[in-house]
C-alpha cells in the first residue's frame, strides 16, 4: 500500500494531466508527472528510469476518466513490483483502456453533462437568477470531482475490477438521456426568449412559433457544413439590414 | 451492405467517432475490423461498452469482417467501418470489401513516422499501401471530424485544423 | 490610468480561464457563461458580463474538445468581448446592449486567432517531451517530470496571445465602427440578442442529427410557449 502522502500528491497532480498536451504523444508526459511520486516510491535507480520510460509512451484519454485509469495503473505497478509478473502488463492495460474510456468520458461529460447544465444555467439566467453561473459550476463539478477522487481511489483499490464498476454506470446511455434533457431545456429556453423578445418589440405573440423556421433553416445550413461563425455573422448582417 | 464511412483510426472506437461521425453519417452500426482486438476478449468488452444502446457494434477479424459485409446480416444497416492501419485497409479491400472512399482520422506516433498533419504520421509502408488503394480507385481524404476541412491525403501539411 | 489597469486585470482573468480550457482542472470556468460574468465582475459590471455569457454560451456548445481537434476559442471571445464592451462604455441594462452586441460581433471573427495560438502551444509542448526524453536518457527522472509544468507557460501564453489578438484590433476598430453601426445595432438589438442563442441552438441540434432530439425540442418549445402566452 502506498503511503497516504504519496496518494495525496498523485491526487493533487491529477488535474494537471494535460498541461503539456502535444501532438506526438498527447498526455504521456502528464501521466509520467502524475505517477512519478508513486514510481519513485516503488522503484529505485535503473528500475525507476525504466518505469518512467514505460509511462512516457503514447497516451490519451478523457481527462476525468484518467482518475480510475491511473488508479488501476498504480495497482498494477505495485503488483508488478511485488511479483515478477503482474496479472496484466501495465502498458497493455493503458493501451487498451484509453480509447474506450475516452469515448465514454467524451460522450458523458462533454456531450452529455456540459450542454445539459449549460442549458439549465441559461434558463436560470433568463429567469433572472444572477447565480446561474455558480449553479452551472456546482452541478458540473460534482460528477467531475467524483470521477477524479473516487475514480482514483476505486481504481487503486479494485485494480482491474474497476473496469466492471465503471461499465455498470452505463455512461454512453446516460449521455443519450442527457442530450434528450438538453433538447427539452433548449426548447423551453427558446420559447421564453422568443416570447420576451416579441413582447418587448410589441409584436403579436401568435408569431412566436415562426421562430422555429429560422432555427430549422440554420440547423440545415449547419448540417451542410456552414460554420457557426459564418452563420452568426450572416444572420447579424441580415438583421442589421432589415431592422437597422 | 452499405458502408457509410470507412475510416483509418488507430484509436478505433473513441470520442471523435461516436460523438461526431456516427451522427454525421447516420450510422446505426460500427464494424471494427482488427485481428488483435477481435482476439482479445477484454478489449472487445471495453469497445462494446463505450457505445450507446442504439448503435450496434461488431468487433471482427479482417477475414470475418469481409464475410460479415458480404453476407446478409448487415444488408440494410448503415455501417461505419473502422480500421487501425493502412495495411488492414488494403487487406480488407483485397478481401473484397470495395469501399469507394477512405477517411484518414488518426495515425499517431511510433518510430520512423513522419508527421504530415496534427493527427496523421505516415510510415513509408503507409504511403505504399495507400498508393495501391488509390490506384485501385479509392478516394483517400484526411478529415479528423466532420467540422474539419476534407483534404487530399497527398496535400497534407502540419498546420492547424478545424 | 485606471483604464489600462482594467485591461491588465481582464488579462489576468483571460489567463486564468484560458488555462482551464485544456491545461488545468477543467472546472469549466472557461465556458462563456462563467468566463464573461467573471470578467464583468472583476471590471465592475457583473450583469453586463452575465449578458455576454448568455449570448455566447450556446454558439459552440456542440463542439467537443475531442482528440487533436481544437474548437474555436469561445473563452477568449467571452473575456475579450466583455472587456471591449466595458471599455467602450457599455453598462448593464437596455442601453448597454447595443454596444455589447457590437463588441461581440467584432470579437467573434478576431477569436479565430485562438486556434493558431493553441496549436502553437501544443507544438511547443512537443519540445518539452523531447527534453523529458533527454533527461531520462541521462537517468534523471525527476528532472524529466519537471519539463511537464513548462507546458502551463505555453498554454498561458496562447491565452494571453488570443486575448491581445481580440483586444488590440478590437479597441482600434470599435471607435471607428461605432459611429456608423451603433445606431443600426441599437434598432436591431432585441432581434440580434435573440439570434445569438437561436443560432447556437440550431447548430447544436443540427450537429446531433437526431430526429427524436429534434422532436423533443419542438414539443418543449410549443408547450412552454403556449403555456406562457395562452392559445
Image (cartoon, rainbow, N blue to C red):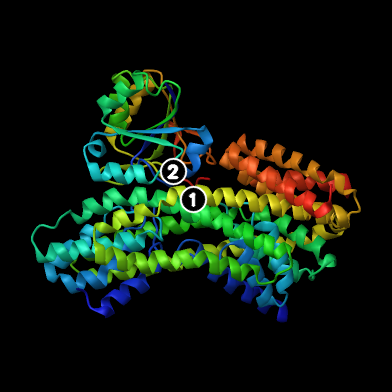
Whether B44 is drawn above or below A97: the answer is: above
Which residue is more in the foreground, B100 or A126?
Answer: A126
Give the position of the N terminus of chain B as an image quadrant: top left
Measure the alpha-carbon separation of dots 1 and 2.
8 Å
Q: In the picture provided, is A43 more to the left or to the right than C42?
A: left
Secondary-structure class at tag 1: helix
Residue A50 vs B138, above or below: the answer is: below
**Residue under disc 1 on the same chain as residue under disc 2:** no
Q: Quadrant of residue B107?
A: top left
Q: Which residue was labeled with disc 2?
A: B52
Q: Position of residue B2 (x, y in %)?
A: 44, 22
Is residue C157 something that shows in the picture?
Answer: no
| Tag 1 near tag 2, CB within 8 Å | yes
Q: Is residue B93 visible?
A: yes
Residue B119, position in %: x, y?
40, 44
Pick the front one: B57 or C40: B57
Numbered badge on residue C213: none
Chain identifier of the residue bearing label 2 in the image: B
Question: The residue marked by circle 1 belongs to what chain?
Answer: A
Observer-nearest of C168 and C56? C56
Which residue is located at x 29 percent, y 44 percent?
B45
The residue positioned 36% from the left and 67% from the top of the image is A150
Judge left or right: residue C225 versus residue C23.
right
Q: Nearer the viewer, residue A147 or B152?
A: A147
Q: Residues within 10 Å of mark 1 (few under 14, many from 20)?
A: many
Residue that label 1 marks: A175
Amino acid at each position: 500500500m502506498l503511503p497516504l502522502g504519496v496518494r495525496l500528491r498523485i491526487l493533487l497532480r491529477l488535474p494537471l494531466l494535460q498541461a503539456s498536451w502535444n501532438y506526438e504523444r498527447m498526455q504521456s508526459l502528464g501521466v509520467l508527472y502524475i505517477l512519478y511520486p508513486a514510481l519513485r516510491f516503488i522503484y529505485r535507480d535503473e528500475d525507476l528510469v525504466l518505469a518512467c520510460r514505460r509511462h512516457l509512451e503514447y497516451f490519451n484519454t478523457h481527462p476525468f476518466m484518467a482518475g480510475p485509469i491511473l488508479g488501476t495503473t498504480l495497482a498494477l505497478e505495485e503488483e508488478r513490483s511485488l511479483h515478477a509478473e503482474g496479472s496484466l502488463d501495465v502498458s497493455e492495460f493503458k493501451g487498451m483502456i484509453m480509447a474506450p474510456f475516452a469515448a465514454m468520458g467524451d460522450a458523458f461529460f462533454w456531450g452529455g453533462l456540459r450542454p445539459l447544465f449549460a442549458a439549465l444555467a441559461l434558463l436560470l439566467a433568463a429567469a433572472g437568477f444572477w447565480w446561474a453561473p455558480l449553479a452551472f459550476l456546482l452541478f458540473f463539478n460534482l460528477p467531475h470531482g467524483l470521477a477524479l477522487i473516487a475514480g482514483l481511489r476505486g481504481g487503486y483499490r479494485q485494480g482491474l475490477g474497476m473496469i466492471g464498476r465503471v461499465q455498470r454506470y452505463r455512461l454512453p446511455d446516460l449521455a443519450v438521456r442527457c442530450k434528450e434533457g438538453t433538447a427539452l431545456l433548449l426548447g423551453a429556453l427558446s420559447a421564453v426568449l422568443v416570447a420576451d423578445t416579441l413582447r418587448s418589440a410589441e409584436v403579436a405573440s401568435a408569431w412566436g412559433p415562426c421562430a422555429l423556421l429560422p432555427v430549422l433553416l440554420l440547423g440545415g445550413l449547419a448540417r451542410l457544413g456552414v460554420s457557426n461563425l459564418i452563420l452568426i455573422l450572416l444572420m447579424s448582417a441580415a438583421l442589421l439590414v432589415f431592422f437597422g | 451492405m452499405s458502408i457509410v464511412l470507412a475510416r483509418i483510426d488507430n484509436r478505433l472506437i473513441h470520442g471523435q467517432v461516436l460523438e461526431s461521425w456516427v451522427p454525421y453519417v447516420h450510422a446505426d452500426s460500427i464494424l471494427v475490423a482488427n485481428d488483435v482486438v477481435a482476439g482479445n476478449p477484454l478489449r472487445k468488452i471495453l469497445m462494446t461498452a463505450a457505445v450507446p444502446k442504439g448503435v450496434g457494434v461488431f468487433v471482427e477479424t479482417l477475414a470475418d469482417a469481409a464475410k460479415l459485409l458480404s453476407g446478409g446480416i448487415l444488408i440494410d444497416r448503415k455501417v461505419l467501418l473502422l480500421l487501425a492501419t493502412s495495411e488492414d485497409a488494403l487487406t480488407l479491400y483485397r478481401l473484397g470489401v470495395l469501399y469507394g472512399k477512405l477517411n484518414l482520422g488518426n495515425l499517431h506516433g511510433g518510430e520512423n513516422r513522419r508527421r504530415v498533419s496534427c493527427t496523421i504520421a505516415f510510415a513509408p509502408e503507409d504511403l505504399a499501401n495507400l498508393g495501391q488503394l488509390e490506384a485501385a480507385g479509392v478516394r483517400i481524404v484526411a478529415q479528423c471530424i466532420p467540422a474539419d476541412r476534407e483534404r487530399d491525403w497527398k496535400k497534407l501539411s502540419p498546420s492547424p485544423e478545424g | 490610468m485606471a483604464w489600462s489597469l482594467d485591461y491588465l486585470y481582464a488579462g489576468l482573468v483571460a489567463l486564468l480561464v484560458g488555462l482551464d480550457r485544456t491545461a488545468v482542472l477543467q472546472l469549466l470556468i472557461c465556458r462563456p457563461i462563467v468566463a464573461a460574468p467573471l470578467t464583468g465582475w472583476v471590471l465592475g459590471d457583473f450583469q453586463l458580463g452575465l449578458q455576454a455569457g448568455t449570448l455566447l454560451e450556446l454558439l459552440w456548445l456542440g463542439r467537443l474538445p475531442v482528440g487533436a481537434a481544437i474548437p474555436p476559442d469561445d473563452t477568449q471571445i467571452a473575456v475579450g468581448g466583455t472587456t471591449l464592451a466595458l471599455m467602450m462604455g457599455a453598462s448593464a441594462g437596455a442601453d448597454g446592449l447595443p454596444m455589447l452586441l457590437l463588441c461581440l460581433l467584432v470579437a467573434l471573427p478576431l477569436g479565430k486567432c485562438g486556434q493558431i495560438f493553441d496549436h502553437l502551444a501544443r507544438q511547443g509542448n512537443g519540445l518539452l517531451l523531447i527534453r523529458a526524453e533527454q533527461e531520462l536518457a541521462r537517468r534523471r527522472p525527476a528532472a524529466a517530470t519537471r519539463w511537464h509544468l513548462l507546458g502551463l507557460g505555453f498554454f498561458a501564453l496562447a491565452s494571453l496571445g488570443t486575448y491581445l489578438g481580440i483586444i488590440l484590433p478590437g479597441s482600434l476598430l470599435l471607435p471607428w465602427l461605432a459611429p456608423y453601426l451603433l445606431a443600426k445595432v441599437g434598432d436591431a438589438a432585441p432581434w440580434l440578442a435573440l439570434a445569438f442563442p437561436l443560432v447556437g441552438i440550431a447548430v447544436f441540434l443540427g450537429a446531433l442529427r437526431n430526429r427524436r432530439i429534434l422532436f423533443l425540442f419542438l414539443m418543449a418549445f410549443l408547450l412552454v410557449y403556449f403555456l406562457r402566452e395562452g392559445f
